[in-house]
Image (cartoon, grey):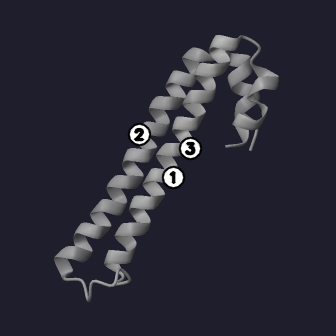
């Protein structure tokens, strides 16, 4: 996350800085975890897992897992963003939101 590279330039209060860093790391972890689950499920759905041809039910379950992983990551992202808004000032949050 680009925000982790500049957060120390924006947030001067050490306690809030550490909390915000942790939250941004959690955002990154949520998306990395979701991507790993989606990749694993896509391998099952596309018969790339080496376990043979998947059944229709296995394919359906794999797509449901991909959707659930994405949904969970998005829900976690929203929760973390709300928490960041409580930890950071509006100015700090706005500055860090501009970093891509």
Front residue of 70 and 29: 29
Left or right of residue 42, residue 8 in this image: right
Outermost residue, front direction?
50
Could you classify mark 1 by the number of other residues whose Cα lies within 10 Å: few (under 14), some (14-19), or many (20 or more)?
A: few
Pair 3/2: label in front: 3
Residue plotted at (45% across, 52% down): 33
Contact? badges 1 and 3 (CB < 8 Å):
yes
Residue plotted at (57% across, 36% down): 25
Pair 2/1: label in front: 1
Q: Is residue 38 above or below residue 76?
A: below
Secondary element at tag 2: helix
Quadrant in which the C terminus is drawn: top right
Secondary element at tag 3: helix
**Count of numbered tags:** 3
Q: In this view, does 17 lie above or below 37?
A: above
For label 2, the residue is: 75
Give me the C-alpha separation between circle 1 and circle 3: 6 Å
For label 3, the residue is: 28
Residue 43 position within the rendered picture, expressed as x and y whole percent measured from the top left: 38, 76
Could you classify mark 3 by the number of other residues whose Cα lies within 10 Å: few (under 14), some (14-19), or many (20 or more)?
A: some
Give me the C-alpha separation between circle 3 and circle 2: 13 Å
Contact? badges 2 and 1 (CB < 8 Å):
no
**Dot placed on the residue nearer the N-terminal end, 3 or 2:** 3
Identify the image quadrant of residue 81.
Answer: top right
Quadrant in which the N terminus is drawn: top right
Q: Identify the disc placed on residue 32.
A: 1
């Amino acid at each position: 996350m680009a925000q982790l590279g500049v957060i120390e330039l924006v947030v001067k209060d050490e306690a809030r800085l550490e909390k915000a860093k942790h939250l941004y790391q959690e955002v990154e972890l949520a998306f990395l975890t979701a991507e790993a689950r989606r990749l694993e499920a896509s391998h099952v759905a596309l018969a790339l897992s080496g376990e043979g041809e998947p059944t229709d039910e296995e394919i359906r379950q794999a797509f449901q897992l991909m959707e659930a992983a994405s949904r969970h990551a998005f829900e976690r992202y929203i929760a973390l963003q709300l928490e960041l808004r409580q930890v950071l000032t509006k100015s700090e949050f706005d500055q860090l939101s501009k970093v891509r």
